[in-house]
Amino acid sequence: MEILLVGSDNELMRTMINKMNKEGHRCYVLTGNKNQVGSYKNAYEKYRFPYESDCLKEIFDSVRPDVTIFMGVYDYNFDWTDPRRESVRYQTALQNVLTSFSVLKRGRFVYLSSGEVYTQSYQNDIDEREETSAYSFRSVAISQGEDVCRNYKQTMGTDTVILRLDHLYMMPERTMGGNKTVIDANPCAKMCIEALETGYIQANANKIFSLLYVNDAVEAIYKAAAAPELKRGLYHISSGEEINEMQLAEKIQKELGQRVTITDNTVGSMVRVILDNKVFADELGMTVFHHVDDVVVKMAKYIRKYSASFINLEDVRGKRQRNWRQTLRVIVDATVPFIENMVCFIPFFMLNNRAVGSRYFANLDFYLLYVLLFAIVYGQQQATFSAVLAVGGYCFRQMYNRSSLDVLLDYNTYVWIAQLFILGLAVGYMKDRLRAIRNENKHEVQYMVTQLDDIQDINTSNVRIKNMLEVQLVNQNDSFGKIYEITSSLDQYEPSEVLFYAAEILARLVDSKDVAIYTVANRSYARLFSATSPKARELGNSIEYTKMEDMYRLLKEKRVYINRSMDPQYPLMADAIFAEDEMQLILMVWGIPWERMTLSQANMLIIIGYLIQNAVLRANRYLDALEQTRYLQGTKVLEAEAFESLVKAYLTARNKGLTECTILEIDIEGKNLEKCGEELAGLMRQSDYIGKMKNGGLYALLSNTDSKDADFVIKRFENTGYKSVIQEDVAV
């Protein structure tokens, strides 16, 4: 599947990427941030675009995800220190992502919600039918996000599912030690940091909740994402392990030592919020692997080891000082034009005074030039201010020779003021308008450049993906065509050689040097038929496969066994080949890396097994058809031609290191060959053969037996009255 993860780089995101990769799916990431934040290790492709970007539709068209997972409240791109502003940004981001997803008209959208939508106290575990009780900006935003997903599901017909996670916690990141929002969302980490910073842990025994570890949450999220069909649109995911703050504090105190004191803040009524995961567990299955007792110990040790990364929070005084400097800078930037205006007014006032009565400059209006200058440079605001100063200067100069009343009654004064303001405001308006047009053009150009850069980034990513897929299609060894072509080469071998070369071909297809094929002797034991290396022979020539319970349970269900626990007593992968519901062969593989032990590799092993099965069945049917001509009549002794063909196949395989075999020449001293052969056949295993050769002698072929093990068979023959010797060189 193609998985698109939407969110910041954190422990939840990394765990989810690793889980998806392990299961054989391809992960793409929409970071929600243009800046280089987080490495998103093991992600197939990263799209570093903000949620408000217009390129989201192109990203969805490029990825065409089968599943889109929106991290929601677990996305550290949202800083909830200002919840009012961030709730609006949160809703906008979700709407933009959902809109782009709905246009695609394919795939499933998973919205990760939180138990924070319940803020009241509930006596019983909360099931999905319970109405939310959110009241803070953050919890209301989460709840509204759920409503948006439901609306899209109803109106647009999208496949959306909401997963409410109950008090999710994880190992805190050292790089985010100062992020108060992240710390507050992790109750266990919050208590550990509080204990190291102050020496006290404040706990309220009336606060009861259930903690869900990130790995368990990811397992549940994957089940919901990978399920072919979901019966509901909302599920609760919880560990179901009830605990209160006081109990959690005591566990942390026990790990950090007695120097940490618990402050009992048990006040008020009980507040119990635990989600009921019964619906999810019944439909998809829910297993809790990480329990609070174990994780708290590890987390406390981790935070204590790297305490400097968590308790050195940002200095509030320094923050206030930076805010004060920033505010002062804004004030200075706003007042400088007014100060400059007043300073420039002084020389214009002096020039106007000198021009009065001058023969050459009497008709020159310096105040008008002054107003026009500031209107052209700064616009209407400074033009108005400079006009006010000019009017004051004009009136002040007129009162040198006249009274203030005469100046106010003179209509020429008002005509001059009118023309001053009209010209100043007109020129200032033009200046402001030109500035606005210039800014609009600049923003439009910047927007288009940003769009062009985004398109180039997406195109570069698409070209890189296209080239990688082309290389995969052309060169890959695990395509169905290549697998069929390679396994079809088994048809060119003799029927007795098919299984030997099947091991060789299997090793080639799974890219492993350690492959073994066991033939099932009965309902309990299997015999090693061929192996490609000493490592593949470690289990021995004979195994009681029913005692290998972990492997046998999956094989009898016709499923591939994957040794995720890396148990050395088991192969890394195994598959069984059946004929008419009876297990015939067991394919075992070692020597493959952990990252390739995926669902994709398991499916490929099943396909290879089916193709090998077809070749083996054809060979067996051919041998069954020739059974009358291969054996001496009424005996289990092979005819010379059939026996020599079988010996040749075993010797060739032994020379290639695919098997071990020993050939015994039996001295029958003139006795009846058929009678001796029939008697000796009863002393041999089902996987061994006895037959005659063209030289007239009687021979035994012991499969998967070296010279040392052959001594037991030789002694068994001697006890019956037959001498035998090992033949190293047999001419066939």
Image (cartoon, rainbow, N blue to C red):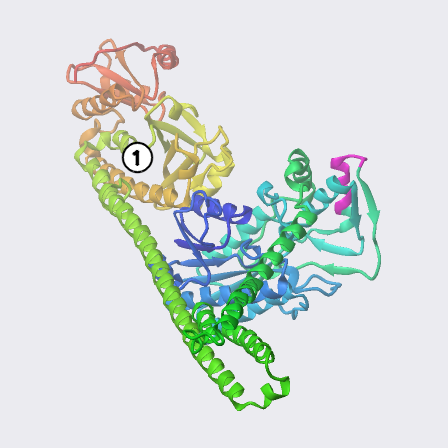
Is 453 rendered above or below residue 99? above
Q: Can you say which quadrant of the picture contains the C terminus?
A: top left
Residue 546 percent location from the top left of the image? 48, 35
Q: For residue 189, what is the image quadrant?
A: top right
Any part of residue 233 in sight = no
Q: Looking at the image, which is closer to me, 416 or 225?
A: 416
Residue under the image location 51 percent in, 35 percent down: 565
Q: For this rendering, which residue is in front, 167 or 709?
A: 167
> Relative to the observer, which residue lies in front, 389 or 394?
394
Would you say 21 lies left or right of 173 here? left
* Residue 580 place in picture, x, y as percent: 34, 46
The residues colored magenta run 248-259
Q: Is residue 564 magenta?
A: no
Residue located 41% across and 33% down the image: 593
Classify residue 237 by image quadrant.
Answer: bottom right
Magenta span contains residue 256: yes
The spot of residue 339 in percent (x, y) is 57, 63
Q: Is residue 595 above or below residue 435?
A: above
Q: Is residue 213 above or below residue 110?
A: above
SS type, badge 1: helix
Q: Main secondary structure of the magenta part?
A: helix
Q: Which residue is mark 1?
A: 506
Instruction: Name the spot of residue 9 as percent of width and height, x first.
Output: 51, 48
Mark 1: give few (<14), some (14-19) or many (20+) Cα within 10 Å: many
Disc 1 residue type (three-letter):
Leu
Q: In the shown orientation, is residue 620 left or right of residue 457?
A: left
Q: Quadrant of residue 714?
A: top left
**In the rendered picture of this protein, how many numbered marks are placed on residues?**
1
